[in-house]
Image (cartoon, rainbow, N blue to C red):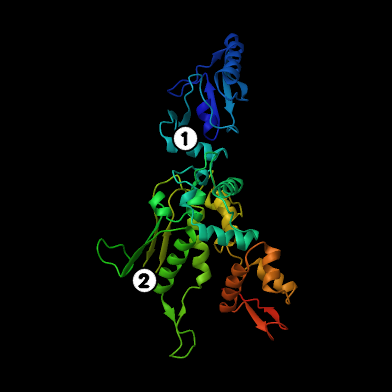
Amino acid sequence: MAAFANSDGGMIFIGVADDGTIPGLLRQDVIRINQLISNAASQLVRSPLAVQTQNVQVRKGRVVIVLTIPKGMDKPYFDKNGVIWLKCGADKRRINSKEELRRLFQFSDQFRADELPTKAGVDQLDKLRFRDFLRDFYKLDYPDSAAEVARLLQNMNLTTDDGHLNLACVLLFAERPEWIKPQFVVKAIRYPGNEIHVSDYIDTEDFSGPLRKVFDDSMAFVMRNLHKVQAGRGVNAPGQPEIPEAVFEELLVNALIHRDYLVSATIRLFIFDNRIEIISPGHLPNNLTVEKIRAGISNIRNPILVSFVAKGLLPYHGLGSGKSSGKIKSPILDLLSDRPRMTIPELAETLGVTTRAVEKRIAIFRRLGLLRRVGSAKGGYWETIEKNEG
């Protein structure tokens, strides 16, 4: 029962033999076995389980008890000896590794990978980067004392109770994240042709540092290796990327903030002649499927990372739908469509992001031909342009 509750729930048929035959139970045994089930679910499993039983008559005088165990809401569940079990096909197995235990806590929303404590202290903080974030988003000055910095970090859910930086803080604000967590970097390779080669490559680089630096360097690698097209421009004008930069922004941001940080592996970025592959370690979280994503259902694996990235640290949209309706949707475009004379500071205040983040998004929309400025910088207005992407 504990194994089923720690997995997706299930049913146990009491009165069915291992070979599939159905001898059933005598009616005088049913009351006794139902009482055993109730006692086991309430007293021998921690936390207690609410299970259901149904008596199914299979032939005269014989009954099969169908025991239904729901998917547990208070995982993990332990047996009477304190062992955690998981269902594995038709069998069960005990959890033996820290990684499995962490993932089980993660599935039950009791634990998140970005909350993991590291061995880094507050002295590993990139003070300039953190100072700029406090100034741009919270309009705060950097604290004067180390004790105030430590208290502020804890209030922002970026440190543990004993003052160590958690994984989210290391990835966002540490001076050298790769010294603390060397596995969480991006490895990029540009291959000739359309296949992976053992030794032949055109360009290769590893990107490390805080997430913003990793993102910027990875974007630069993609753009310098992307095919350029003339797009009707003069021979002396630089070519346009065959795929808009905004496409890769969202892909890279998702790979960095939604990856499974319980898996000690790098993000891999492969560029071929006919495609680009971004491989993010791990699987979809918490029983999320591609079909659910297409239906608009999302699941945030690393909520601390997402909350800070959404404050303008990366160009994150937070849509999570994995699909396109043919038009680019953006809060900035929606606002400017209704109020074309809004200023960049007004947009930033309304959206709760930095002016720099708004300026970058506007620059992208102007390059894509979705937005243009009419008139002067002070007395003019914005004009949004509907354009189908095809």
Residue type, mark 2 in image: Asp
From the top left corner, tell me how far across and down residue 31 is, in percent: 62, 12
Residue nearest the viewer, comparing 34 with 362:
362
Q: In this rendering, which labeled residue sits more in front, label 2 or label 1?
A: 1
Q: In the displayed image of the protein, which residue is found farthest to the top?
A: 28
Q: Is residue 319 visible?
A: no
Which residue is at a point 39% across and 70% down the rendered structure image?
Answer: 274
The residue identified by callout 1 is 101
Residue nearest the viewer, comparing 237 with 277:
237
Label 2 neighbourhood size at 10 Å, few (<14), some (14-19), many (20+)? some
Q: Is residue 315 visible?
A: yes
Please give the label number shown on residue 335. none
Residue nearest the viewer, comparing 269 with 232:
269
Q: How many marks?
A: 2
Q: In the displayed image of the protein, which residue is found farthest to the front?
A: 144
Which residue is at a point 48% across and 39% down the rendered structure image?
Answer: 103
From the top left corner, tell me how far across and down residue 33 is, in percent: 57, 14
In this image, 155 relative to 7: left or right? right
Q: Does 110 appear above or below 331? A: above
From the top left corner, tell me how far across and down residue 72 is, in percent: 58, 32
From the top left corner, tell me how far across and down residue 180 is, in percent: 41, 49
Q: Does 280 appear above or below 116? A: below
Residue nearest the viewer, comparing 94 with 308:
308
- Mark before the other along the chain sequence, 2 or 1: 1
Please tell me whether mark 2 sits on a helix, a strand or a loop: loop
Q: In the displayed image of the protein, which residue is found farthest to the left?
A: 199
Q: Does 95 appear above or below 45? A: below
Which residue is at a point 40% across and 67% down the rendered structure image?
Answer: 275
The residue identified by callout 2 is 273
Which residue is at a point 43% across and 70% down the rendered structure image?
Answer: 220
Quadrant of the image containing the C terminus: bottom right
State how far apart marks 2 and 1 are (Cα): 42 Å
